[in-house]
Image (spheres, rainbow, N blue to C red):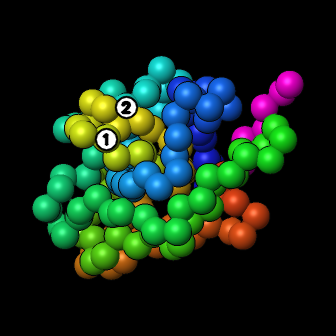
């Protein structure tokens, strides 16, 4: 699996313009039709109507992750969380999940900042099965900024 942080999130985290302490996050599953772009800043920028699994179809719902920890030590920013479980999903073919997106919840998708994408590198076709995303204790994703 490949993980990528969104540059806008890195910028806000590194320069301290956005606080993630106590924030609520959401996890979304995206189809292969979604293309990660460094210019995406908010959930709405991703074309979720066409690219996210269809909410309410095959039991898919966005998930609120727990145990989110975003820490910065020196030049290293690390994201960890409890396992994220999408329960009893049915999505196959072109509708199958290809990646997971983590975002901070705002008042709307147009104001919900993107944090990271986890690319599965292949369709995860499932029929009435859970999809679980685990973070290692060393961090799900780490970003090292240069001074």
| x 52%, y 34%: residue | 18
Give 43 or 111, whichever is nearer the viewer: 111
First reached walking from the N terminus: tag 2 or tag 1: 2
| x 28%, y 46%: residue | 52
Image quarter hosting the C terminus: top right
Residue 28 location (% of width, % of height):
35, 53
Determine the CA span between mark 2 and mark 1: 9 Å
- Decide: marks 2, 1 in contact (CB < 8 A)? yes
Left or right: 106 in relation to 73: left
Q: Which mark is residue 42?
A: 2
Residue 31 location (% of width, % of height):
34, 47
Give 137 or 47, whichever is nearer the viewer: 137
Residue 93 at least partly seen: no
Q: Nearer the viewer, mark 2 or mark 1?
A: 1
Say above or below: 2 vs 4: below
Q: Which residues are magenta?
A: 142-147
Give 131 or 96, whichever is nearer the viewer: 131
Residue 35 location (% of width, % of height):
43, 32
Q: Which residue is mark 1?
A: 106
Say above or below: 125 vs 2: below
| x 47%, y 55%: residue | 22
């Amino acid at each position: 699996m490949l993980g990528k942080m969104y540059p806008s999130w890195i910028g806000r985290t590194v320069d301290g313009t956005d606080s993630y302490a106590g924030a609520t996050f959401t996890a979304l599953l995206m189809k292969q039709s979604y293309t990660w772009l460094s210019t995406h800043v908010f959930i709405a920028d991703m074309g979720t109507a066409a690219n996210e699994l269809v909410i309410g179809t095959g039991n898919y719902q966005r998930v609120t992750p727990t145990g989110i920890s975003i820490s910065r030590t020196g030049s290293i920013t690390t994201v960890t969380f409890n396992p994220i479980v999408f329960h009893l999903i049915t999505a196959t073919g072109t509708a199958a999940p290809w990646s997971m997106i983590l975002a901070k919840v705002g008042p709307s998708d147009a104001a919900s900042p993107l944090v990271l994408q986890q690319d599965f590198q292949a369709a995860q076709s499932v029929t009435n099965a859970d999809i679980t995303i685990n973070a290692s204790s060393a961090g799900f994703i780490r970003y090292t900024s240069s001074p």
